[in-house]
Amino acid sequence: MRARLQLSGISKRYGPLWANAGIDLVIHPGEIHAILGENGAGKSTLMKIIYGMAKPDAGEISFEGKVLEIQNPRHARSLGIAMVFQHFSLFENFTVAENICLGLDKAFSLRHVRHRMEEITQQYGLELQAQAYVHSLSVGERQRVEIVRALLMNPKLLILDEPTSVLTPQAVQKLFVTLRQLASQGCSILYISHKLDEIPQLCQHCTILRAGKVIAEVNPQQETRASLSRLMMGEEPFESAPVHSQGAGLTRLVVNALTLPKTHQFGVDLQNICFELKSGEILGVAGVSGNGQSELLSALSGEDRRAAPDSIVLNGKSIGGTWPQQRRALGLGFVPEERLGRSAVPALSLVDNVLLTDNASGRVALGWIKRKAVAAQARAIIEQYQVKAASEYSAAASLSGGNLQKFIVGREVMQLPQVLLVSQPTWGVDVNSAAVIHRELRFLRDKGCAILVVSEELEELFQLCDRMVVLSKGRFSPIIKSSDATVEQIGQWMSGLWPQSQAPLEDTHATT
């Protein structure tokens, strides 16, 4: 059988760093092929070369038997190559339908695109509103736009980068059925995921990259999660500690009947949100992206200051209506889901990014910044969190997504906040990096911090959290202990299907 895509000796260098070094890869029609590797292994660079976003320094690309140079993404799409990015390429001031139109090289009317969108979203369970503006969407919803746009192209080769991070467990299985159908019709699929349990379920072949080189090609159905991780890292996988609860501590955060109308047409109303968060515990918030997660975190962090004063109480003080810096002064830390542009300024160095949220204790005196002390803090974060960066003076934009995430989490954790809000802590992060982040969050919890984790990764919530709740259409489900929950139950609740007769705070921990 003639290969759909063949790469021979592909190499790409950025300064002294070889992102790809002599990579060979063969993809056949109808094949679902996984590409695995830790953050910084060269996966994204290789996909950009295939999609025409980067030119290789050496090597040869053959598509359907023809040797060619893929000039740009438009050329790639004309060949039948579509890509769903982990980091998005969307215009924020345009609607979903307009963004999809812009991504299609043939001229289609908005009416036609909306009709096809409706068909695709219903078929794949990817809820989207065609008229919503992209700037109003969460990260997960933006990823759905990319997925739908790619599927509308009827591609011959579909590249998927972390496609299941926005889906319920049931929707993941539905997507897998769809991908298998696409493959049976001859579509080739390159599948990148850090969820190692997904790979044997879906993929027939797996190429593993490490430090820009192919170090193994395996049949994932004959491998275990541990063996795949070992091949990726070149060492034994980092073991996560088991979840344990230290019992009820001091009440740090109380949210009482928090109700807020949406701020834009496509937002979500928060409806009577009630919970308590105590020191020494991690409460996980599950849910499909776009169900009120961003609205809840904006209200808690102070970005949205419309809440009634007594609806949010931090360390005994009513903070509804206060500014974010006032909440930070009372011990609140925050890790948003958007890394570049919100958690970090892309063009600034890691040293300068430390100062964005750092309390500056010992690093600022009489209005003067102690640059050496700030640089030392940045180096400490890099070392403790195993951040791969040339130096503490590297620009934030130069780091891979996973390494930047470790730096951002480290910046917050090392300030020892009393309450920490974390959104999507390990989105797009490799298994070892995720374990490092989980370890540090548990360390902070065991130091007495109260932590709220918002994540669409159910496995992560079960591994990390003492208690769990589901947010669906702006409402909270009952709060339950993680040890009492099941994936199937939480998956149903993510669709809004929980017993309405139960009070939101039905376990004894929550009501003490």
Image (spheres, rainbow, N blue to C red):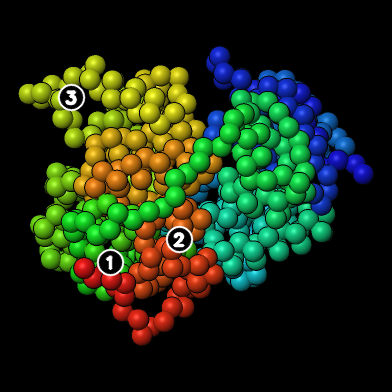
Q: What residue would you read off at disc 2? A: 289
Please name which of the two marks, 1 or 3, marks the residue nearer to the observer. Answer: 1
Q: Quadrant of the N terminus?
A: top right
Mark 3 or 2, nearer chain start: 2
Q: Residues within 10 Å of mark 2 (few under 14, many from 20)?
A: many
Q: What residue would you read off at disc 3? A: 363
Tell me what residue is drawn at x 37 percent, y 73 percent. Answer: 477
Looking at numbered disc 2 in the image, what kind of residue is underneath it?
Ser
Numbered marks: total:
3
Looking at numbered disc 1 in the image, what kind of residue is underneath it?
His
Q: What residue would you read off at disc 1? A: 509
Tell me what residue is drawn at x 45 percent, y 19 percent. Answer: 390
Q: What's the distance in space between the residues labelled 3 and 2, CA to CA?
A: 38 Å
Mark 1 or 3, nearer chain start: 3
Residue 232 spot, x, y in % from top left: 63, 34
Left/right of residue 216 with respect to residue 73 in the rendered view: right
Looking at numbered disc 3 in the image, what kind of residue is underneath it?
Arg
Could you tell me which secondary element the residue under label 1 belongs to? helix
Q: What's the distance in space between the residues labelled 1 and 3, CA to CA?
A: 39 Å
Could you tell me which secondary element the residue under label 2 belongs to? loop
Q: Residues within 10 Å of mark 3 (few under 14, many from 20)?
A: some
Please name which of the two marks, 3 or 2, marks the residue nearer to the observer. Answer: 3
Position above or below: 429 against 271: above
Q: Quadrant of the C terminus?
A: bottom left
Q: What's the distance in space between the residues labelled 2 and 1, CA to CA?
A: 27 Å
In which quarter of the view is residue 181 placed?
A: bottom right
Query: Is 328 in front, or is 315?
Result: 315
Left/right of residue 71 with respect to residue 478 in the rendered view: right
Residue 117 spot, x, y in % from top left: 60, 66
